[in-house]
């Protein structure tokens, strides 16, 4: 099983196993405000591209995606299998370090 990476601003990044990474891309594709962000997240998920570079988006889109990513611990708590929360929730909490 491989890894997926999200590159943020100011040399911040987040990585996780592909299963969690692609779940996160699906959440971005479902929930992002920007149609361009939703489209790119969907394209990456569908093609199995294991990275997302937030600097590809406008500053406003970056802010919106980062705000969305910062909510993913609670989304994961509701949607991901409870037997894996000890692994997935701390990893999702790390998203709060992205800028």
Image (tube, rainbow, N blue to C red):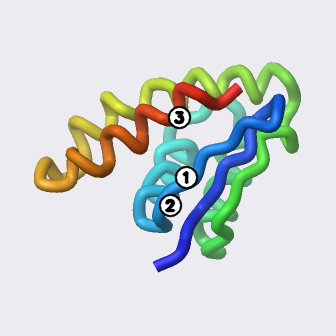
Q: Earlier in the sequence, mark 3 or mark 2?
A: 2
Residues at circles 3 and 2 in contact by the CB criterion of under 8 Å? no
Q: Is residue 6 left or right of residue 1?
A: right
Q: Is residue 16 left or right of residue 65?
A: left
Residue bearing mark 2: 22
Residue at (35, 39) in percent of width and height: 90
Q: Nearer the viewer, mark 1 or mark 3?
A: 3
Is there CB contact under 8 Å for labels 1 and 2? yes
- SS state under label 1: helix
Q: Is residue 36 among the parts visible in the rendering?
A: no
What number is the disc on residue 6?
none
| Left or right, 91 with reference to 5 | left
Residue at screen point 28% across, 51% down:
87
Farthest left residue? 83
**Vertical arrangement, residue 89 with respect to residue 33, above or below:** below
Structural distance between the alpha carbons of marks 1 and 2:
5 Å
Element assignment for label 2: helix
Quadrant the C terminus occupies: top right
74 with respect to 50 (left or right)? left
Q: Residue furthest bottom?
A: 1
Q: Which residue is located at x 78 percent, y 48 percent? A: 53
The mark tally for this picture is 3
User: Disc 1 marks which residue?
Assistant: 25
Q: Residues within 10 Å of mark 2 (few under 14, many from 20)?
A: many
Whether residue 70 is visible, yes or no, is: yes
Q: Residue 38 versus residue 3: which sits nearer the camera?
A: 3
* Distance from the alpha carbon under mark 1 to that under mark 3: 13 Å
Which residue has dot 3 on it? 95
């Amino acid at each position: 099983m491989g890894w997926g990476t999200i590159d943020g601003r100011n040399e911040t990044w987040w990585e996780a196993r592909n299963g969690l990474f692609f779940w996160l891309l699906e959440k971005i594709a479902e929930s992002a405000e920007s149609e361009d962000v939703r489209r790119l997240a969907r394209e990456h998920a569908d093609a199995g591209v294991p990275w997302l570079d937030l600097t590809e988006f406008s500053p406003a889109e970056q802010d919106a995606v980062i705000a969305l990513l910062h909510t993913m611990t609670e989304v994961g708590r509701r949607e991901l299998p409870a037997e894996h929360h000890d692994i997935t929730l701390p990893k999702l909490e790390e998203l709060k370090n992205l800028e």
